[in-house]
């Protein structure tokens, strides 16, 4: 196969294997993000790389940045961090909303050392724990903002909890932020003033990049009990960026709809280095992205204005956009929407495609795979419910594992754990204890269950891990269960995810009481709200059971609790709609949770399908 053939032409597993006959290093030679940024800035110097919309309102003026300006800012930012003592193995903690300065800070930090993007919505205690794990001494944050006072309050709290921080670099924007008050224990640097004094022509450090060097520390959960930090290498980023560029090489240079947060691998890759590698223009849809109501309300207007051809999104956002009328907006440019971060409900995909007239592609990946594990294309959409074939040069198998041992590989159609290895797979977690169950004979264990058909398409059926995924953030059940067990009446407590049309899942808890004890649901919910450290983890429902379902060997059987939670939410939805139906939920060991709904009045089937489209469930309605 030719070295010049594009991966955009690779649509089957056989074509993938043929594509791999050209060695990886010949097809994708870059091994670091700095080289990718530099070559794009030279190729597209006068074109825009970033446009910022501050409010998301219709036709508001944008603030553009050219590729030439961008290269200068990357050099200046890297040189500032270098002057503050950041070496190749030092982390820079970055807690910012999405702004051009956020992009400079993340990729500039990778040029000086290691970038560590942080979720500003996390509790300060969790942010401090992540900073302590990474060993970072430089912290980048917003100056006080009257429009978002919680950001500065969080910054102050993190500084109080993390004495290792020596330098606070603040982003000050005239008219939006206020001066930084006096702070003890840290050196405060105004980013905007400082970089103007730095060299814009090159890296003062003279750094020589190696592919195996760590480029980024990504925390993998939004509300986990203890931070787990993934090490993404320069070569990981470079491989996915070049693959992404190759995938869109048959399309003209485009505007990229950037509304996903940069502290998440999805936004960081697709709206970051992937877009830069393509010479695209990253249109930042307000600092808060999809959390800004105007971005959703004016979405179709923005599509028409910027001619977006594709939009990276998540199922909860697709469900919200489905409800926004297109009106007289010309959205003919939009050909595909990529949905990731959480399972895509099949009915939502069908309805969205029918109404909007574009393909919804179901992506699959994670932080540890540098965002991608499956490849899909609008040219040859995968079968309904599938997430795509494996990436070129990246192995993916389904297997049965026991701890760190791969017992055997599964045959087509046989369910098991999804395992992968290749240039997209990270270098492991920062703390060794987190790696103990992450690998099976050299394969990364995703913790997801699924099967592949004979054509290599992957179907996900559940999660081996018990994390509750709420709005794309992970919640460890332990941080719900342990506090509930502190209640004097509670004997057992088990938390699971209940399907939710907006958040994907919401936490619910099932408990048993000590003999002779009593406690109402209201009392238990109030106790949970007081004692659970993360607001997002407070259960929406607490159910008292006579006994917790167990397996034959006495282990808690969470699939049965998930089945109960699913049945409950479906019965509530039916009652709200006034639809009489019989609901049957079954946990299939091969296919996961299956649901049948038999509607008494067949004329209401379509109404029910529309009402349940946002739930990531395998539902048959008849």
Image: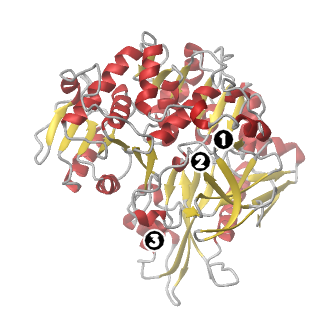
Left or right: where 200 falls relative to 428: left
Expressed as whole percent of the image width and height from the top left, the position of residue 128 reads 29, 54
Q: Circle 2 sits on which residue?
A: 422
Please count the marks in the image: 3
Report which quarter residue 178 is drawn in. top left
Q: CA distance from mark 1 to mark 3?
A: 50 Å
Left or right: where 446 falls relative to 409: left
Q: Circle 1 sits on which residue?
A: 391
Q: Quadrant of the N terminus?
A: top right
Q: Circle 3 sits on which residue?
A: 523
Q: CA distance from mark 1 to mark 2?
A: 9 Å
Mark 2 or mark 3, which has the lower sequence index? 2
Work out whether 326 lies above or below 427: above
Q: Residues within 10 Å of mark 2 (few under 14, many from 20)?
A: some
Q: Is residue 331 visible?
A: yes
Disc 3, SS? helix
Instruction: In this rendered view, identify the residue nearer to me: 164 or 181.
Output: 164
Left or right: where 567 falls relative to 508: right
The answer to whether the residue labelled 1 contacts the one labelled 2, judged by CB atoms less than 8 Å apart, is yes
Disc 1, SS? loop
The answer to whether the residue labelled 1 contacts the one labelled 3, judged by CB atoms less than 8 Å apart, is no
Residue at position x 72%, y 59% in the image: 571
């Amino acid at each position: 196969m030719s070295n010049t053939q594009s991966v955009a032409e690779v649509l089957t597993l056989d074509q993938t294997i043929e594509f791999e006959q050209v060695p990886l290093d010949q097809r994708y030679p870059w091994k670091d993000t700095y080289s990718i940024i530099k070559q794009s800035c030279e190729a597209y110097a006068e074109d825009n790389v970033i446009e910022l919309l501050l409010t998301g309102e219709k036709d508001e003026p944008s603030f553009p940045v050219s590729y030439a300006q961008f290269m200068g800012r990357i050099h200046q930012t890297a040189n500032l961090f270098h002057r503050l003592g950041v070496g190749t193995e030092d982390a820079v903690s970055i807690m910012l909303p999405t702004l051009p300065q956020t992009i400079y800070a993340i990729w500039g930090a990778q040029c000086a050392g290691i970038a560590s993007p942080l979720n500003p919505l996390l509790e300060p205690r969790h942010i401090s724990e992540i900073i302590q794990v990474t060993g970072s001494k430089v912290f980048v944050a917003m100056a006080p903002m009257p429009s978002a006072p919680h950001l500065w309050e969080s910054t102050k709290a993190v500084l109080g909890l993390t004495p290792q921080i020596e330098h606070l670099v603040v982003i000050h924007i005239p008219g939006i932020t206020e001066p930084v008050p006096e702070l003890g224990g840290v050196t405060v640097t105004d980013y905007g003033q400082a970089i103007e004094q730095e060299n814009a022509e090159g890296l003062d450090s003279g750094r020589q990049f190696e592919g195996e060097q760590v480029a980024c520390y990504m925390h993998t959960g939004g509300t986990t009990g203890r931070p787990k930090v993934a090490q993404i290498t320069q070569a990981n980023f470079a491989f996915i960026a070049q693959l992404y560029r190759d995938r869109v090489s048959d399309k003209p240079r485009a505007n990229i709809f950037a509304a996903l947060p940069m502290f998440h691998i999805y936004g960081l890759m697709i709206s970051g280095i992937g877009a830069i590698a393509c010479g695209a223009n990253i249109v930042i849809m307000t600092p808060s992205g999809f959390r800004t109501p105007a971005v959703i309300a004016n979405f179709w207007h923005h599509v028409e204005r910027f001619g977006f051809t594709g939009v990276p999104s998540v199922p909860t956002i697709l469900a919200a956009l489905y409800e926004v009328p297109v009106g007289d907006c010309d959205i003919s440019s939009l050909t595909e929407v990529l949905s990731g971060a959480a399972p895509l409900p099949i009915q939502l995909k069908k309805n969205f495609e029918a109404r909007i007239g574009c393909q919804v592609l179901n992506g699959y990946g994670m932080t540890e795979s540098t965002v991608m594990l499956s490849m899909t294309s609008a040219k040859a959409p995968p079968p309904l419910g599938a997430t795509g074939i494996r990436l070129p040069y990246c192995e993916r198998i389904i297997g049965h594992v026991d701890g760190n041992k791969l017992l055997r590989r599964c045959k087509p159609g046989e369910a098991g754990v999804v395992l992968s290895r290749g240039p997209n797979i990270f270098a492991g977690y920062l703390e060794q204890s987190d790696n103990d169950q992450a690998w099976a004979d050299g394969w990364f264990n995703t913790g997801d269950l699924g099967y592949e058909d004979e054509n290599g398409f992957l179907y996900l059926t559940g999660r081996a891990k018990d994390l509750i995924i709420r709005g794309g953030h992970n919640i460890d059940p332990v941080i719900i269960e342990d506090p509930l067990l502190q209640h004097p009446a509670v004997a057992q407590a088990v938390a699971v995810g209940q399907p939710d049309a907006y958040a994907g899942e919401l936490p619910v808890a099932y408990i048993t009481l000590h003999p002779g004890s009593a406690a109402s649901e209201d009392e238990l919910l109030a106790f949970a709200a007081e004692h659970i450290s993360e607001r997002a983890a407070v259960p929406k429902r607490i159910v008292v059971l006579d006994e917790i379902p167990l397996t034959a060997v006495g282990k808690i059987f969470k699939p049965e609790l998930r089945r109960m939670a699913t049945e409950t939410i479906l019965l509530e939805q039916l009652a709200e709609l006034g639809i009489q139906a019989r609901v049957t939920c079954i946990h299939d060991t091969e296919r996961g949770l299956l649901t049948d709904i038999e509607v008494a009045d067949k004329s209401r089937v379509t109404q029910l399908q529309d009402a349940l489209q946002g739930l990531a469930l395998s539902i048959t309605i008849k």
